[in-house]
């Protein structure tokens, strides 16, 4: 498996984690519970996805 394929797989995995975190965040907001940890996790995931995507784009061009 090439470098680009591995990174694309990681990006897809992060996207799935982001979707799950957003779903959990919406549920927590509806219940009125504290969402600070989930918001921080979502920001961390988005940042790592962005960095990986940029590396893959740079590497493939």
Image (tube, rainbow, N blue to C red):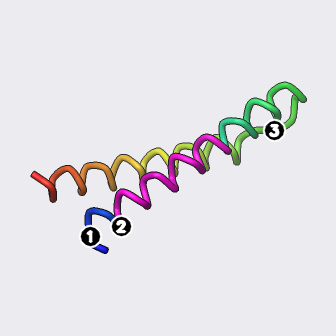
Mark 3 → mark 2, Cα distance in angstroms: 35 Å
54 drawn magenta: no
User: Quarter of the image holding residue 7?
Assistant: bottom left
Please state which of the two labelled residues, at mark 3 or mark 2, is closer to the viewer.
2
Mark 3 → mark 1, Cα distance in angstroms: 39 Å
The residue sitting at 51% across, 46% down in the picture is: 15
Provide the residue designation for mark 1: 3
Contact between marks 2 and 1 (CB within 8 A): the answer is yes
What secondary structure characterizes most of the magenta part? helix
Secondary element type, mark 3: loop
The image position of residue 57, as x and y in percent, is 20, 50
The residue sitting at 26% across, 71% down in the picture is: 2
Mark 2 → mark 1, Cα distance in angstroms: 5 Å
Q: Earlier in the sequence, mark 3 or mark 2?
A: 2
Secondary element type, mark 1: helix
The residue sitting at 61% across, 50% down in the picture is: 41
Circle 1: is it few (<14), some (14-19), or many (20+) Cα within 10 Å? few
In the image, which disc is placed on residue 6? 2
12 drawn magenta: yes
Q: Nearer the viewer, residue 40 or 49?
A: 49
Residue 7 relative to residue 14: left or right: left
């Amino acid at each position: 498996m090439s470098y680009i394929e591995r990174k694309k797989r990681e990006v897809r995995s992060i996207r799935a984690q982001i979707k799950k975190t957003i779903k959990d965040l919406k549920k927590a907001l509806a219940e009125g519970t504290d969402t600070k940890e989930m918001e921080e996790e979502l920001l961390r995931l988005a940042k790592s996805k962005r960095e990986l995507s940029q590396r893959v784009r740079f590497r493939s061009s």
